[in-house]
Image: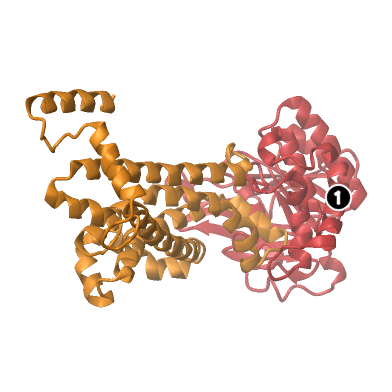
């Protein structure tokens, strides 16, 4: 059995600021009480996280810290729990054990505007035009009851939305509906939509998996430039390890380290490699 | 096709017996129709055909209107709120299996034999189906969209108003189109049993005189009305929801 969450490699001479925290340091009980200085708690701090579906353990002993502004790629074989990890960070699922804090505060247990997300599919709203898809975030923020703005307030929200559309290269398609866009354009739209609430953390769940290589390259450039511009933390779940190396400043590999041949479901995956790119 | 077969059959029967009432020629039907539609009834001074049409369409419209509103509320509640689903879901499922015509006598007893019982029959007949259909449609909206809306800051009411309802409205129109058939069935049955006007009332009234020359134009007219409702709902759906054609977004 490996100690802690796996060996830490230092890639290309960059010093890795966020080390894996050894398992013994946080036992499940003191996960929250161990949270002392606020300085230490910037960014995402995951302590001894476990996730189980019934008797099936998906994640075990995941402890890590992600500094603000990191572009963190997460990869691993199918079924290794990387999407589960993302859903926990998103607030869509609750971890069975352990704690996750964002800037020192426990993560809200429902998805909220501090965390943006782009999924592989169904990420945009088919009934809204491109500009309204992006303006929706502003409308929801500014019209707390019905989520709909009228008149000049609505016009202003749309003007702001168009700026985001131009940033992702969709300025000319503002009036179209999502079904008229190509797959790559739809993902660009979804990114613009996620950015408009200025989230601290952007979660990308295999957003480029269904795109052809040329489109993928262009959208990679876009994501990198947006990341540099905004300085937000990005977590990218991907199957493609090269994509992880290309985009990420840090690469986490999830895998199972223990196997019980008689009860394969009883051991979950954890972080096996933590590489700074 | 049907018309050709009918005309052939009609002319054969009339050749054998010129006073045959079962398959009247088109001229007799046109004559009967114009009597009903163009001439005032000697007893009431009304144009019976149009009075019947008005009475039936009003009943149908009120019944389907109420059913649509209730179905929207019920479908949303059952589709969005797990507690509502747990509490009311089985009830709606079972009540959708009660043959509505079987409770018509109860409606007559409770609401009287007036308009209300006919409207109530239409509402009760189509509502459970529409609620089940719509709540299913709500659940079919991909989870990604719910999550995405929440990450954009949507609360439950905002989620319903901006994401769920707009995507459910075209489904509501579909559901309404499918309900038109049963609604006509309930309407005509109720009118046949107890009414003083209405398309169903008239056909069952003139049946006593074997007046096929009145019944057949009425049936054709009912069919045309049903078709027109369906067609206009279809056009409405296309006009209002241009985004509906490509689903896999």
Name, please, the residue furthest toward the front: B42
What secondary structure is found at the residue carrying circle 1? loop
Q: Residue at x 54, y 42 (%)?
A: B235
Q: Is residue B81 above or below residue A212?
A: below
Position of the C terminus of chain B by quadrant? top right
Q: Colour of chain B?
A: orange
Position of the N terminus of chain B by quadrant? top left
Label 1 marks a residue whose chain is A
Which residue is the site of mark 1?
A16
Dividing the picture into quadrants, the one containing residue A190 is top right
Q: Which chain is red?
A: A
Where does residue A183 sit, x and y in percent of width and height?
A: 69, 34
Where does residue A266 sit, x and y in percent of width and height?
A: 49, 52
* Side of B227 where A74 appears, left or right: right
Residue B46 at least partly seen: yes
* Side of A69 where B145 appears, left or right: left
């Amino acid at each position: 059995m490996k100690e802690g969450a796996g060996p830490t490699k230092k890639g290309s001479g960059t010093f890795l600021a966020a080390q894996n925290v050894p398992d013994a340091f946080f036992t499940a009980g003191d996960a929250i009480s161990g949270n002392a200085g606020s300085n230490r708690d910037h960014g995402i701090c995951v302590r001894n996280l476990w996730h189980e579906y019934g008797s099936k353990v998906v994640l075990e002993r995941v402890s890590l810290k992600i500094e603000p502004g990191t572009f963190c790629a997460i990869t691993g074989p199918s079924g290794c729990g990387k999407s589960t990890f993302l859903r926990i960070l998103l607030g869509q699922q609750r971890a069975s054990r352990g704690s996750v804090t964002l800037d020192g505060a426990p993560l809200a247990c429902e998805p909220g505007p501090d965390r943006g997300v782009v999924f592989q599919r169904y990420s945009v709203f088919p009934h809204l035009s491109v500009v309204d898809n992006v303006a929706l975030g502003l409308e929801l923020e500014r019209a707390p009851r019905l989520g709909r703005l009228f008149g000049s307030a609505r016009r202003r929200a749309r003007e702001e939305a168009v700026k985001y559309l131009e940033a992702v290269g969709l300025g000319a398609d503002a009036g179209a509906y999502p079904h008229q866009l190509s797959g790559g354009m739809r993902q660009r739209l979804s990114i613009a939509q996620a950015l408009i609430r200025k989230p601290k953390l952007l979660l990308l769940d295999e957003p480029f998996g269904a795109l052809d290589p040329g489109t993928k390259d262009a959208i990679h450039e876009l994501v990198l430039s947006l990341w540099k511009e905004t300085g937000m933390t990005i977590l990218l779940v991907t199957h493609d390890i090269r994509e992880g190396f290309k985009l990420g400043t840090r690469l986490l590999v999830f895998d199972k380290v223990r196997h019980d041949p008689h009860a394969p479901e009883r051991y979950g995956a954890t972080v096996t490699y933590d590489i700074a790119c | 096709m049907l018309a050709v077969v009918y005309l052939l059959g009609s002319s054969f029967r009339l050749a054998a017996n010129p006073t045959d009432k079962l398959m009247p020629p088109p001229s007799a039907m046109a004559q009967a129709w114009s009597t009903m539609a163009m001439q005032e009834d000697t007893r009431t001074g009304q144009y019976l055909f149009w009075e019947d049409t008005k009475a039936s369409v009003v009943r149908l419209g009120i019944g389907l209107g109420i059913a649509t509103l209730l179905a929207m509320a019920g479908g949303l509640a059952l589709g969005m709120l797990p507690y509502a689903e747990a509490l009311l879901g089985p009830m709606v499922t079972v009540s959708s299996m009660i043959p509505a015509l079987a409770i018509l006598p109860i409606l007559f007893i409770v609401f009287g034999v007036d308009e209300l019982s006919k409207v109530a029959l239409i509402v009760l007949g189509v509502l459970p189906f529409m609620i089940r259909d719509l709540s299913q449609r709500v659940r079919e909206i991909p989870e990604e969209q719910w999550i995405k809306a929440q990450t954009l800051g949507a609360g439950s009411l905002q989620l319903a108003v901006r994401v769920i309802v707009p995507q459910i409205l075209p489904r509501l129109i579909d559901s309404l189109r499918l309900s038109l058939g049963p609604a006509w069935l309930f309407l005509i049955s109720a009118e046949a049993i107890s009414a003083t006007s209405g398309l169903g009332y008239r056909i069952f009234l003139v049946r006593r005189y074997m007046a096929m020359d009145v019944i057949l134009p009425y049936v054709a007219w009912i069919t045309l009305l049903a078709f027109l409702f369906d067609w206009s709902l279809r056009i409405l759906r296309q006009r209002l929801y241009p985004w509906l054609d490509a689903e896999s977004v």
